[in-house]
Image: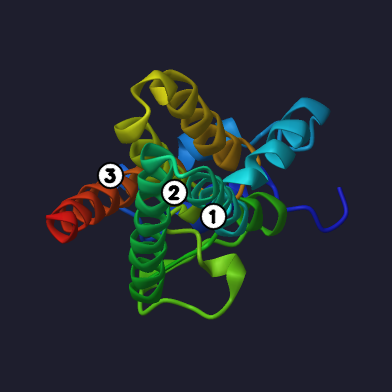
Amino acid sequence: MGNEPSQETDDRNASSTTNDVEKADINLGKKMASKRHHPAVKAAASAGKFGDQGPLYALSSGILIVGVGSRDRRLTDCGLAMLAAIAVADLGKRLAKSLVRRTRPHVLLDQGHYDADTGGSEEKEKQSFPSGHTACTLAAARALSRHFPEASAPAGAATVVIGLSRIAEGKHWPLDVAAGAAIGLVAEGLSALVYEQCRR
């Protein structure tokens, strides 16, 4: 077995100071990430990288450029709305990460160590909460759907796949993804409200 942590060690480290909700979240996350090394999961995780802030900003900027270049008001508005929604979601997840420190699932699964507390952390392995990919992807998807309702189904499906892939890969716990989704929804709603006010 070498230095691999046992299941008993995992459970002891993860449950010594956690509440029932957190324990349930950890147990579900461990089950979902148990096949994280499977080729199918790795493929989904690679596709899920599109949900990072960089690619989303690039996509939104591309839509904006095409809209301006073609003088298409709907495309232009969509690109601007997506950029605003992603920016607010990005800000929200950064704020949350600065307030909460939580070990990523793969650290518990691979090293048998788990920690969660307030105060944030500069270490990426302790920045599990919330899921920035989910927050920004959902914000972008909602903004896109607001201007192009016909894109709602594929945009929503992409958001779900990206969120689940983050759990399956062992990058985030289920509650991290749920929190990211909440941040994305609020961010898009706020940015849309401000955007509409500015257009008047």
Q: Position of residue 193 (x, y in %)?
A: 16, 52
Q: Position of residue 82 (x, y in %)?
A: 40, 49
| Residue identifier under label 2 | 79
Amino acid under label 1?
Answer: Ser
Residue ID at (39%, 76%): 98
Number of marks: 3
Residue ID at (66%, 41%): 169
Can you say whether 121 is above or below 94 in the image?
Answer: below
Q: Position of residue 168 (x, y in %)?
A: 61, 35
Q: Nearer the viewer, residue 21 or 49?
A: 49
Which numbered circle lies on residue 61? 1
Q: Nearer the viewer, residue 138 or 166?
A: 138
Q: Position of residue 163 (x, y in %)?
A: 50, 37
Element under label 1? helix
| Residue identifier under label 3 | 185
Of callouts 1 and 2, the N-terminal one: 1
Can you say whether 84 is above or below 60 in the image?
Answer: below
Q: Is residue 97 left or right of residue 69?
A: left
Residue 108 shows in this picture: yes
